Amino acid sequence: MKILITPKSFKNYKEKTYPILQNLGCEIVENKTGRTLTEDEIIDIASQDVQGIIIGVDPLPKRVLESCKDLKAISKYGVGMDNIDLEAAEKLNIKVKNAVGSNNISVAELAIALIFEAARRVSVLGAGVRNGNWGRIAGVELTGKTIGIIGGGQIGKEVAKRAKGLCMEVLIYDPYYNDFEFLEKYGITLCDSLDKILSLSDIVSMHLPLTTDTKYIINTDTLKMMKPSAILINTSRGELVDEESLYTALKEKVIAFAAQDVFSKEPPSPDEKLLTLDNFILTPHAGAFTAEAVERMALYSTNNLVEMLNL
C-alpha cells in the first residue's frame, strides 16, 4: 500500500510518524519538490496504487480525485478542507478526515500577535530603530476594547479566552453556536447577527471555514458597517475577504487596519496592491507553523489515515 505525503513540514516529524505507517506495511511517497504540488503532479504520482494521502494545502478537486483510481482515504494535515472536493470524495467513496484540535492554540496565538501588531506596530517601530529612526507611532490600548469573533469553533474559543485575559469585551457571532456553558464561564456575549458584531467591535477576528456562504463575507457593504477605527484580523482563509474591497476600505480609511495570515492566492503577486499600504500586514500562512502544532498535525493526520484505512 502506497501513501502519498504532501506537506513540506511533515518531514520534521518523520521519526515519529513514518514508523507507524511502515510497521503496517505502507510504502511512503514523499513530496520532494519543496513546495505545494500542482493538480497534475498529484495525478502523476497518485493515479495508481496510492491508497492514502496525507494532504496539506495541495489541491484535490474532482478531476484529481477521479484520476486517483486506488485512493481510499484522505487525511488532512490541519483543519481547513476547502482544498478538497468533499462532495466528489463522498461520491467516490473516499474517506476524509481532518486533524481537529491540532493547531487551534497556535492559530489563536498568532491572531493575538496580529492584534498587538495592529495596535502597537511593533515590527515597524523595531525596523525604524534599526534604520536609525527613533520616531514613535501612537498606538491604542486593547484593555476595554471590544473584540468581535466571527466563528465560535475551537480556534475562536481560544482567541476569546486570551482576549478576556487582556481585559477586553468579547462578542461571538456564529449562527451554529451552542456552547452556552463556555459563554457563561468566560463572560462572553453571543451576537445574533453579523451586522451587529461588525458595528460594535473595535477588532474583528475571523475564525470560520470557507464555504459558498462565507466566501467574501467581508466585502464593501460589510466593511462599511465597521468602525472607522476598527482592526480586521483574518487567520482563516483568504477568500473570506474581498481583497479589492479591503484595499479600497483601507485606502479610504473606512477601517483603520487589517492584518492577515492568509490570502486568496498564496503567495500573492509581487505587485499586489494591498502590500503597498502601511495599514495592512500579511504573514505567510504561518498560524499553524509552531513546533507543537506541526507535531500534533503530523501525529493526528497519520493516526487518522491509519484509522480510515483500517490498518
Image (cartoon, rainbow, N blue to C red):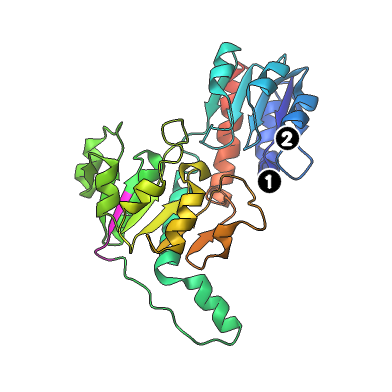
Kind of residue indicated by mark 1:
Asn
Residue located at (48% from left, 46% from top): 242
Question: Which residue does the image show at 52% across and 52% down from the upper left?
Answer: 261
Number of dots carrying numbers: 2
Residue holding disc 1: 12
Q: Residue at x 54, y 32 (%)?
A: 82
Residue 109 can be seen, yes or no: no
Say whether residue 240 is magenta.
no
Tell me residue 290's x, y (percent).
56, 52
Front residue of 101/141: it is: 141
Does residue 196 appear left or right of residue 19 in this picture? left
Q: Which mark is residue 38?
A: 2
Sequence-wise, the earlier of marks 2 and 1 is 1
Q: Say few, some or many: other residues with alpha carbon within 10 Å of mark 2 (under 14 / 14 to 19 / 20 or more).
A: few
* Discs 2/1, front: 2
Q: Which residues are magenta?
A: 143-148
**Residue 278 against residue 44 in the figure, above or below:** below
Q: Amino acid at mark 2?
A: Thr
Front-lying residue, 64 or 122: 64
Image quadrant holding the N terminus, namely: top right
Residue 215, image x, y percentages = 46, 37
Q: Is residue 90 above or below residue 43?
A: above
Instruction: Identify which residue is drawn at 65% across, 58% down.
Output: 271
Q: Does residue 21 lie above or below 163 as drawn?
A: above
* Quarter where residue 298 is shown: top right
